[in-house]
Amino acid sequence: MSLKADFELMARYNQWMNARLYAQAAALDETELQADRGAFFGSILATLAHIHAADAHWLRRFANAMPGLASLDPVRAMPLPELVRGIVFPDFATLRADREALDTAIIAFTVEAIDDVYAQPLSYTNSAGESHTKPAGLVLRHVFNHQTHHGSLAFGVVDLHAGIC
């Protein structure tokens, strides 16, 4: 399978799982969403906000490095959330809407990009101020793995018995 086909599949799967995760989280009240669950970022809401913020920053790095990809124009126009520990969104509904917009942008990016795009070097500066250059495909794989890493924990906390994971 080509990277293009693999990443298109991953983007659609990611969107599907995020929709399921957010639907489960929507059934919780604000106190439950903000309760410290022992996850990396404490609460379910903070974990979801972290995943969203990281995705937004990674996609902006792609957008800055690949100005010819029109699919990344919405990402260029999105305000970047802060990369902080804790809750950065005023409410769950706002976070959910922003997540849906970001998932749509990720899918559009993977549909437009071709395998040659993923072979290109992507130079960026991380949140610690360190500069890196890595193949774009390797970086995008990290983006999906990051969501899985934190999302599966948040999903497990939200509904341990759903049998989805």
Image (cartoon, rainbow, N blue to C red):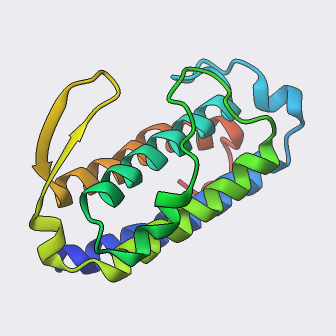
Q: Picture coordinates of residue 69 (x, y %)?
A: 32, 74
Q: In which quarter of the image is residue 107?
A: bottom left
Q: In which quarter of the image is residue 30?
A: top right
In the drawing, does residue 158 fall left or right of residue 41? right
At horizontal 75% and vertical 51% (from top left) the residue drawn is 24
At horizontal 60% and vertical 18% (from top left) the residue drawn is 38
- Residue 161's place in the image compared with 7, above or below, is above
- Residue 81's place in the image compared with 136, above or below, is above
Q: Picture coordinates of residue 36 (x, y %)?
A: 70, 18
- Residue 49's place in the image compared with 77, above or below, is above
Q: In the rendered view of the protein, which quadrant contains the N terminus?
A: bottom left
In the drawing, does residue 93 fall left or right of residue 133? right
At horizontal 37% and vertical 48% (from top left) the residue drawn is 58
- Residue 63's place in the image compared with 88, above or below, is below
Q: Picture coordinates of residue 76 (x, y %)?
A: 46, 59
Q: Picture coordinates of residue 17 (x, y %)?
A: 56, 61
At horizontal 65% and vertical 34% (from top left) the residue drawn is 157
- 60 or 98: nearer the viewer: 60
